[in-house]
Image (tube, helix red, strand yellow):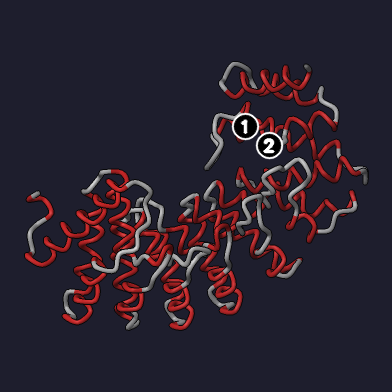
Amino acid sequence: MLIRKTVEQLKAANEGEADSSEVTDIVHDLTSEQLLDIMSDNNIYNWMDVKDGPVTDRSRDIIKTVLNHIMETSKEATKINKDLIKLAFIYSAWIGDKDMANTLLQSSSSTGITPSEMLNTTTDVNILKFSPLHMAFKSDNKDMVRYLVQTTKEHDTLENVLFNTDHYHEIALQYGCKKNATDAVKAFLNVLREDKNMLEKVLLHEGSCGHIALHYSTSLDDSGLAEALIDAAKTNQELLEKMLLQGDITDNTPLAEASRNSNTDVVKLLLATSKDLGLLEKVLLQPGEFGCAPLHHCCSVASYHYQMGADIATAHALLDAAAEDRQLLEKVRQLFYIARVILYEPKLICSCILCVAHILAHARHRIPVDSC
């Protein structure tokens, strides 16, 4: 009951119904066990007004009040104090407070925690297993991401910190890509640019469903994140080729995923990059899930959802990329005859075939999509 009441009090404070002194009184009345409970995944989102992305100024102030109290009261080397200090470090990364993070890191030894443990920490109450670096990506805080990577170089090996996985088996970079944390991702890649071996490892690391970072970028509305990932690898042709041709657990490449997501901008970017590397034919024809090429994926999406606009535009981008090479264009057109899209209702299979035929007719006769 006390925890529920405290959550309600903090929620009211977060909504502006209490001043800073009242928040301080609420927090100072809590025991260490209650502090740990209040800041757990189960409760913190109940009183904060944001679950993903950067926190609001009001939420940040309340969290700082809680974290300051933790630093003041958790100085003995007990297990619960260790958990509180670790949790405080995780949340300092989320709110982007480098001074607080640095103070926690420097003073952690008094509770028997090494800097390496702090940087790798997830704690038992952090159910989603987000590390401090995950949390910095969560708020798209490029300065905090830069601070954590540079601090890791001083206290630990990058191999340990960069490859911590969360509840979804995703490393921090992949989580940042999933959350469209473009600024933080760019800062992260820039810090690693000189360490080519480590850069290759994080860019090719397989996370949930076998996805690499480039796969995650294909579900976003713009191509900015995909551009950043490709730019980071542009000086290493072998790495870039691996990224473009990497299949997930269903053998879908990033181009196949972008086609399935009807993300025309990313499709065009991947095609242009592939063309520059001489990989255009490979990426256009490489079979993925159910043996489907990228063209099949955008057509199957159109047939399943009965939405043609964006999917036709995506398919046009795929066909137009092959248009300069008559032999390649013919191979892409032949995909219509060898389609292996597996859908479960006959009417959807027919719809899919009609969709492909419709697109090929447009490509053959150069009829604008808007004329339909």
Residue 231 location, quadrant: bottom left
Image coordinates of residue 86 in percent, x first then y, are 78, 47
Q: Would you place residue 313 above or below residue 272 in this image?
A: above
Which residue matches tag 1? 45
Instruction: Identify the residue at image location x=60%, y=54%.
Output: 144
- In the image, farthest residue toward the front: 346
Image coordinates of residue 95 in percent, x first then y, are 61, 43
Instruction: Identify the residue at image location x=56%, y=36%.
Output: 51
Q: Would you place residue 148 above or below residue 241 in this image?
A: above
> SS class of the residue under badge 2?
helix
Quadrant into which the N terminus falls: top right
Number of numbered discs on residues? 2
Task: Say left or right for 68 vs 183.
Answer: right
The residue under label 2 is which amino acid type? Asp
Q: Tag on residue 41?
A: 2
Q: Would you place residue 203 above or below residue 277 in this image?
A: above
Q: Tag on residue 304?
A: none
Q: Residues within 10 Å of mark 2 (few under 14, many from 20)?
A: some
> SS class of the residue under badge 1?
helix
Image coordinates of residue 50 in percent, x first then y, are 54, 33
Q: Nearer the viewer, residue 187 or 335?
A: 335
Task: Say left or right for 151 vs 74.
Answer: left
Instruction: Identify the residue at image location x=76%, y=22%.
Output: 3
Residue 194 location, quadrant: bottom right
Task: Say left or right for 281 vs 196.
Answer: left
Instruction: Identify the residue at image location x=60%, y=47%.
Output: 96
Mark 1 and 2 residues: CB-CB less than 8 Å, in contact? yes
Image coordinates of residue 284 in percent, x first then y, are 31, 72
Q: Nearer the viewer, residue 54 or 134?
A: 134
The residue under label 1 is which amino acid type? Tyr
